[in-house]
Amino acid sequence: MSNASIRPLATFTIVPPVSQDVFQHLEPNLKIFLSQNLLERLPEELFHLERLTALSLRSNQLRELPAAIGKLHNLTELNLALNRFEYLPYEILELFTQDSSLQKFTVHPNPFIQPEIPLEKIPIAGQEGEEEEEASRQSSRRKAVERSAKSRYSESLGYGSGKQWRAVFKHRSEVRFFSKTGKLIRGPSFERTEDTTSPHLTIPTTSLSTTISPPPPADTFSSHAPSLLELSLQSCLSSTQAPLLPSYLPEDAPQHLSTLLTSTLQQKESGLDRCTRCQRKMAIKRTEWLEWWQISRNTDMSAVGSAASPLRRMENWSERDQGEKMIPFVRRGCCWSCGPDVVDVSPVDVDIADQNR
């Protein structure tokens, strides 16, 4: 699906009806349904349609959703179900802010990556009463402090409590670090093993207070300057000969150059990623991590479904369990310095009601 096929829709208008020799002003209301088209990528122009109010991508072969999805603030309906998404772009959280128009959000089923949450240490049975009570008290306080830190983190990003939706940060994965050529150096693998029978990949989580320590050399961590390879790839995209450039490489050129150039040209069609920290465009990601956020409605929207339609009732987020409400969002950085925030989770005064929530 090309950008050229979508671009004309940007000028979509409505011919206003005439009533008593007066033209009525009507706002365009554009809805696009692309279900069951075997799509593997989406054109960038699709996310420049400011008047788009409904977008259905149901039942395709999509693995990645462009970050530009966060620009579609007029969306009232978004359907991403039955694709191959293991995570969604972090920028999609922009659709759950106070000014959000989104009313219907459908993402299940998809093979989302699940968090591997460390088990809470349980007091050993048989301990003396005072020791067991103290251990239980410390555990409750630790959970309350962590909840408070996660809530502060959510609100600091502006995704606390919106008009219709509530997005709350829950877990974070370890950071994946990549070389200047895009090779994974350290961090969890997102690749599935052949003997995996579960439809969902599971990876470990880490605390908000975990210090981010990049691989050596240490001087790379403090540099925000893009590499020469990064600048070259972005320069290639501006060439009128861009689609032919991979064929111009000499036969003895390193294999990774051809791979990177081809993947960058493919990214161009959907729009280059932007660093989620400094918003700089990037062809090669240098850091990557997942954040699991719990998405739920602020109010009961059961009117969306009907008693005669069990399927529509399942789309009601108030009826979903905690696991289904928790969605992984991917964040990417342009350099090793652009990693996740380290949040202080040291003991603070926590309301007793919060501890018992």
Image (cartoon, rainbow, N blue to C red):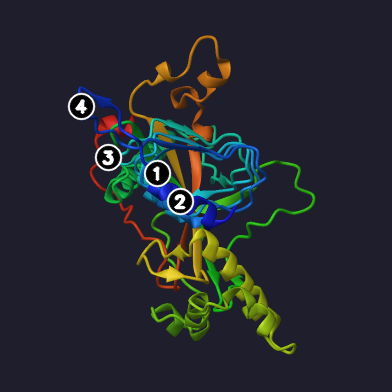
> What's the amino acid at mark 3?
Asp
Q: CA distance from mark 1 to mark 2?
A: 7 Å
Label drawn at residue 157:
none
Q: In what quadrant of the picture does the C terminus appear?
A: top left
Query: Which residue occupies 70% across, 53% down?
Result: 192
Q: Residues within 10 Å of mark 3 (few under 14, many from 20)?
A: few
The answer, for residue 330, to whether it is visible in the render is no
Q: Which residue is mark 1?
A: 12
> What's the amino acid at mark 1?
Phe
The answer, for residue 277, to whether it is visible in the render is yes
> What's the amino acid at mark 2?
Pro
Label drawn at residue 21:
4
Q: Residues within 10 Å of mark 1 (few under 14, many from 20)?
A: few
When asked about the image quadrant of residue 260, the answer is bottom right
Query: Which residue occupies 53% across, 34% down?
Result: 323
SS for callout 2? helix
Query: Which residue occupies 24% across, 33% down?
Result: 25
Depicted 74 relative to depicted 253: above or below: above
Q: Residues within 10 Å of mark 4 (few under 14, many from 20)?
A: few
What x and y, as percent, mark residue 93? 39, 46
Q: Nearer the viewer, mark 2 or mark 4?
A: 4
Position of 9 with respect to 159 (left or right) is: right
First in residue order: circle 1 vs circle 3:
1
Q: Which residue is mark 3?
A: 99
Depicted 321 relative to depicted 13: above or below: above
Position of 270 with respect to 202 (left or right) is: left
What x and y, as percent, mark residue 322? 49, 31
Query: Which residue occupies 51% across, 69% down?
Result: 285
